[in-house]
Image: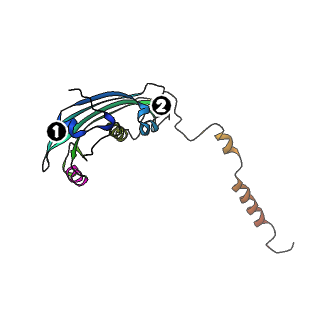
Amino acid sequence: MQSDYAPESLDVASFSATASRLQGVSPLEQYPRLAQDCLPAPEGVQVRWLARGLRLALPGAGVLPALHLQAQAELPLACQLCLGSVRTPVTVDRRFAFAASEEAAARLDEQAEDVDVLALAPRLNLHALIEDELLMALPLTPRHANACPEHVPMSAQSEGFDAAARRPSPFAALAALKDGSESGPANGAKA
């Protein structure tokens, strides 16, 4: 059932009671915290999302308003090997139940295994929830799947490294001074 609910100010209790559904495609720019974790990308990076209202029975809490959230995006992240851009698919498929208070939500969240329990607010910003979930779903070390498109140097050597190794060490000069002073006259002795 499609509804007239606004994702920026969602009445979760009513949305779940009517088993409503919202879906959309939003530009990455609508999620500033998520965009901040991405590399600059050409226009057109989008987040696709779907939210369905439902009711869930949780032990010790009865039937609660709930939300099934799905979101996906192909984000331009920095490859941790070559530091180049790698398009990384990120998906979210989560269910949330809403308890009457923060205390009840914390207690129920500890017991629930396949659902997150949040406190029911008069209005929920669905886009903020989508952004939070996508941020938590980002990979820790994004990388190109098979091989980086650019050659990645795998050693600490760089151009000019050999030339730097051929320069005399300043400590070698100190050692030569020390060796020279030991073979000369003793400290304070006159020749």
Residue shown at 69%/44% (left/top)? 166
Whether residue 144 is visible: no
Q: Is residue 76 left or right of residue 23?
A: right
Q: In which quadrant will I find the N terminus?
A: top left
Q: Which mark is residue 55?
A: 1
Magenta range is 102-109
Residue shown at 75%/66% (left/top)? 182
Q: Is residue 7 left or right of residue 191?
A: left
Name the foreground residue: 173 vs 90. Answer: 90
Query: Image height check: is 32 above or below 41?
Result: below
Q: Amino acid at mark 2?
A: Ser
Mark closer to the observer (1, 2)? 1
Query: Image height check: is 91 above or below 167?
Result: above
Q: Residues within 10 Å of mark 1 (few under 14, many from 20)?
A: many
Residue 114: % across, % down: 20, 42
Provide the residue designation for mark 2: 85
Whether pointer 1 and pointer 2 mark residues with C-beta atoms closer than 8 Å, the reply is no
